[in-house]
Image (cartoon, rainbow, N blue to C red):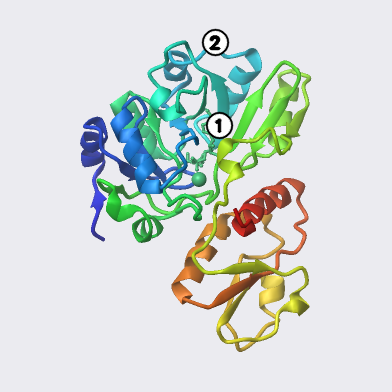
Amino acid sequence: MPNLITEELAFERLLAGGVVAVPTETVYGLACLAESADAVARVFKIKNRPSDNPLICHFHSVSQISAYVQPLSETEKILFDHFSPGPLSLLLRLNENSPLYPATRSGRTVVVRIPAHPVFLSLLKKINKPIAAPSANTSGRYSAVNTQMVLEDVGALTDGILEGGECVNGIESTIVEVSDKQVTILRPGVIGPDDLQDVLQSNEIDVPVRYGTTEQTTPGTKYKHYAPKTKIREITSPDQFSSDKRVVFISTDEYTSRIQNVHTLSLGSLQYPRQIASALYQTMFKLDQLHADEALIFLPEINNKHWQITIRNRLNKMLSSS
Ligand code: TXA
Ligand code: MG
């Protein structure tokens, strides 16, 4: 595949102010030095990202993060120690005059994460500088979970793609904000409220974990997001689908298996909610490759509250018109 580069080249290009697509355990990221205004500007251009939407920053350790942000609270430390490296992102307050302002769009907060993917983590250690990396997709589109998806979208505009296989989670990190009173989930993702609550409880921290309200969310969530190129509509009952060769039916195994003689795409079985989340973006990619006129999606109720909320969150953004 053209554009694939080695870790050594990725290191050199990032350090020189380039933009490289990198693997993480959630989705691929479009990486650059967080402190470089020029490199950050290129990421915004490649993604066609609204300029008020700050970039998540990646680090190799809590001690590296600590140099850029105000002291972490006990609860933040406990959550980060437990879940990092991994798919938990924290919204933290920056130090005054932070060098991360290009990535945070001059905002006083930063979303940070220590990724668990061995290739990216090793790169972060070698570079030893914060790396801004939003998901490696054009703004509004589904995130890429393998190098082929990166290549079909923003890949050719980058200085290379670092191969790291399929992303094991296939859906983004959970972003949380911690206060004395509660832990707020700003974007639902791989880690659920029960996972967070268990860790808090076992450390005798008695604060509730809540999903944020519509106002308590990340700027990125106000835009249409995660959508395929193909027109997609939701139906609320599988019976609303009538066979049409140019229309693709997307649902879970339980419903796609009932339909014959048309293209169907399955998100997996309702028995495995986590896999439905993992399959979501790949399914949208497969849909786009079919060049159909339209897709209809029927998402049955998922018998797991966190995955229901997370998958619904992505689907609602995908189907929203703005
Ligand atoms: O799993 C992930 O988090 C992936 C991988 C590559 O790390 N990254 C990712 O980036 O999903 P992105 O840009 O697609 O989503 C990050 C979200 C956006 O909704 C953005 O608005 C929000 O984080 N965000 C970033 N910095 C923020 C800040 N300072 N305050 C509030 N929200 C912020
Ligand atoms: Mg994104």
Q: Locate residue 191, reporting x and y percent.
A: 63, 39
Decide: marks 1, 2 in contact (CB < 8 A)? no
Q: Which mark is residue 241?
A: none
Label 1 CB-ligand 1 distance < 8 A = yes
Depth check, front residue: 101 or 160: 101
Q: Residue type at mark 2?
A: Pro
Q: Residue furthest bottom?
A: 261
Q: Position of residue 169 (x, y in %)?
A: 54, 48
**Picture quadrant where residue 10 is located:** top left
Residue at (62% x, 52% y) in the render: 317
Q: Quadrant of the N terminus?
A: bottom left
The residue that label 2 is drawn on is 71
Q: Give the class, few, some or many, for how many residues have Cα within 10 Å of label 2's Cα (few <14, many ≥20).
A: some
In the structure shown, which secondary structural element does the residue marked by tag 2 occupy? loop
Residue pointed to by mark 1: 89
Looking at the image, which is closer to me, 237 or 1?
A: 237
Q: Secondary structure at mark 1?
A: strand
